[in-house]
Amino acid sequence: MTQSQSVLVRTSDDETLPTTVRLPATAEAVAVGVVAVFVAAYWAVSSILIHRAFHSNGWDLGLIDQVVWNTSEGRPFSYSFRDISYAGDHWQPILLLLVPIKWLAAGPEPLLVAQAVALALAVIPLYAFVRQAAGYAPAAALSGGYLVGLGAARAVSFDFHTEAFAPLLAFSALWALGRGLPIAFLVCGLLTLTLKEDGALLALALAWIAWIAFGQAKAAAVLAGVSVVYGYFVTALLIPHFRGDDLNPFLERYSYLGDTPLGVVFGAITHPHLVAEQLLRIDSVEAIILVLASAAFLPLLAPRLWPALALVMVIPLLSKSPSQGDLELHYFLVPSLVALTIAAVVVRTHVDRQCSLRLGSLRLNAVAWPVMAFAVPVLLFAFLSPLPPSFSTDWRRFDVDDHATLAADFVGDIPPDARVSAQSPFVPHLAERTHIHQFPRILDAEFVLLDAYGPVPAEDHAAGYDRCLASLPQLGFDRIREEDGFSLWQRTRPAETATDAPPECSGRR
């Protein structure tokens, strides 16, 4: 190992812990557990309120709920949102572990609870790692920063995503590295591959940290090798096999660089000016600053670990999809957790026995730097979090008002086995059936449910929302109920031959 590498490698044991005031071990463990339970409940209630207020979405909560429900009914990865298997859209084998949730017959809300629990449990290995490496105050500061962080808040406020399990796996891998348990590290790292096809990027980031910061070259090489092979197999062979000619996500997001994984890499290498142009956008720069701020800028102290952060941050930033390219919604979660992982390594390396943080010739005392490490994420939460209490909170999203109650009544009017096309906020409430479409996709639907006051995603407008709505009578639908902006339509007669409706609306191929 070179001298530059050894700067980041430190053996932590009980004899080198900072001499700080400590709680008894049992009381400390109980305190961390209580906080995790409290935060899990807060996140679960927040996401359930959003859902019950009809501010959840067909893409993604309704979609995932139907996929898991279909899988529980013996139709693995089947869904009706596109004319392909869901495995041709995203590869997320971890969804198989969620199938027992459907036995509760409680709709999508158990998925939201599972998401909240997984996010909250992640604080336990994070706290344990920092506590062993640097002491009580640093552990409390970084763990608190995670719990109030924008990453979790944005994920909780936007439906359900399998990335919610990433913090638990990544921080558990970090804890295993701190304990010198390469097998446990490998297990956690390999499990990140089950989250999504781009889980390979997170696994590679963890491999880099294991090699550079902990000297675990063998475990890092195994994880990196498996991740590269797995990532290529899934994105270049498996997903295209299930997708067929239906769509190409690389064309949707990276068409300016290439239309395949290797094509995107080759395009980025041969056209660096396009990469620079995308990364130097104001929105991209703001996203990078927010990721660093979510970890109190501590990753700046470990330049040898920056490639790990770049792996999970640069590729999303290169996407032309607005939300992904700006690291909004759930796309912020993985970059922010890698930043916090690096911050934990920095603390392990730079905190001395008196719990002071060494920044070259500058030393921050045991009170100042933990307060700063916690205060920065708190400030981000106060001004930018979509969850309450924050200046950015849209309280209407959490208000189960009379309009939401009436919406639930309209949902109840639709037979449980009927084929339905519905506006986005209704879809998660109707998803557990073999045929659910997000309007303006109608095809063979028997019922259409719309809300004149509800949000319409931009892609639905682009797909011909207004034209399809105007064509409903031509398509054989009659309005059977209308109240407070809601309209429920039922197909009562054959469609007319001539129609100006979009193909998916009319059922024409």
Image: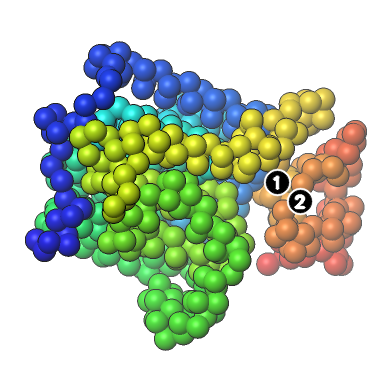
The residue under the point 45% across, 53% down is 292
Q: Looking at the image, which is closer to me, 360 or 318?
A: 360
Q: Is residue 54 above or below residue 341?
A: above
Percent of width and height locating residue 401: 79, 26
Badge 2 marks a residue whose secondary structure is loop
Q: Are marks 2 and 1 in contact (CB under 8 Å)?
A: yes
The residue under the point 44% across, 60% down is 313
Q: Looking at the image, which is closer to me, 193 or 491?
A: 193
The residue under the point 48% across, 26% down is 40
In three-dimensional space, the C-alpha distance between marks 2 and 1, rounded to whole angstroms, equals: 7 Å
Mark 1: give few (<14), some (14-19) or many (20+) Cα within 10 Å. many
Task: Name the amino acid, label 2.
Answer: Val
Q: Which residue is mark 2?
A: 456
Percent of width and height locating residue 344: 31, 43
Residue 56 appearing in the image: no
Residue 34, quarter of picture? top left
Q: Looking at the image, which is closer to me, 216 or 249?
A: 216
Q: Is residue 196 above or below residue 121?
A: below
Q: Is residue 473 above or below residue 385?
A: below
Badge 1 marks a residue whose secondary structure is helix
**Considering the image in quadrants, where does the C terminus appear?**
bottom right
Q: Which residue is mark 1?
A: 424
Outermost residue toward the front in this view: 361
